[in-house]
């Protein structure tokens, strides 16, 4: 078990990058199957970052969250700053929450829903603040946030047990 924990910091950046790409492909695949205009955002990267906070130190995770935010912004938005700001802030929030809450399966699921909501609303807030979108509050909740939460709830329900085992989260 100790040997596995020693190589986690070395493989996590590659996993984060791979998950960033998978997030985009899953989101686009679901979007292309739907006939109504909705914005499904898959957040596997955020999910694995959340579980990685149980094994890796805060400085390491904040650094890689910023790097992934920079890559995410340049790859998907062509506007640097949105995820570059949000990912490190969410990682800090994750450490704050899990220092105070016992990480049971239920609290992990509920926490992840809160983190996804914060990420989605933070993106919309920053995009609106910098006049990069002209969406209404009704569109945000019905066409972006609701589908994103449904998709990510399904994903966390599928992956919570395997990820708890992979990252050795006890409860």
Image: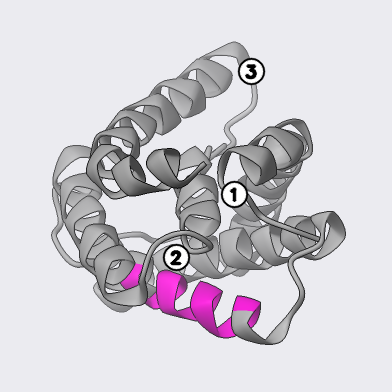
Sequence-first tag of 3 and 1 = 3
Residue 131 in view, yes or no:
no
- Is the C-beta separation of discs 1 and 2 under 8 Å? yes
**How far apart are the alpha carbons under marks 2 and 3?**
23 Å
Residue furthest to the right:
106
Q: In the displayed structure, does residue 106 sit left or right of residue 64? A: right
Q: Please give the label number shown on residue 35.
A: 3
Q: Foreground mark, 2 or 3?
A: 2
Residue located at (27% from left, 72% from top)? 85
Around disc 2, counting alpha carbons within 10 Å, would you say few (fewer than 14), some (14 to 19), or many (20 or more)? many
Q: Secondary structure at mark 1?
A: helix
* Residue at the disc numbered 1: 144
Residue 16 location, quadrant: top left
Residue located at (21% from left, 67% from top)? 63
Q: In the displayed structure, does residue 40 sit left or right of residue 124? A: right
Residue furthest to the top:
33
Indicate whether residue 19 is drawn in magenta.
no
Q: Secondary structure at mark 3?
A: loop
Sequence-first tag of 2 and 3 = 3
Q: In the displayed structure, does residue 99 sit left or right of residue 82? A: right
Sequence-first tag of 1 and 2 = 2
Q: Foreground mark, 3 or 1?
A: 1
Residue located at (45% from left, 54% from top)? 49
């Amino acid at each position: 078990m100790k040997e596995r924990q020693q190589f986690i910091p070395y493989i996590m950046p590659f996993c984060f990058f791979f998950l960033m790409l998978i997030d985009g492909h899953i989101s686009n695949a679901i979007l292309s199957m739907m006939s109504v205009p909705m914005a499904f955002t898959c957040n596997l990267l955020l999910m694995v970052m959340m579980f990685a906070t149980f094994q890796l130190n805060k400085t390491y995770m904040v650094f890689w969250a910023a790097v992934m935010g920079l890559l995410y912004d340049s790859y998907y938005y062509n506007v640097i700053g949105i995820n570059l700001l949000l990912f490190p802030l969410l990682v800090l929030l994750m450490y704050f929450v899990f220092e105070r809450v016992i990480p049971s399966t239920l609290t992990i699921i509920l926490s992840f829903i809160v983190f996804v909501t914060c990420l989605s609303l933070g993106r919309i807030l920053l995009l609106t603040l910098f006049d990069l979108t002209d969406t209404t509050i009704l569109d945000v909740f019905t066409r972006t946030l609701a589908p994103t939460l449904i998709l990510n709830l399904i994903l966390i329900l599928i992956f919570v047990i395997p990820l708890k085992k992979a990252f050795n989260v006890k409860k």
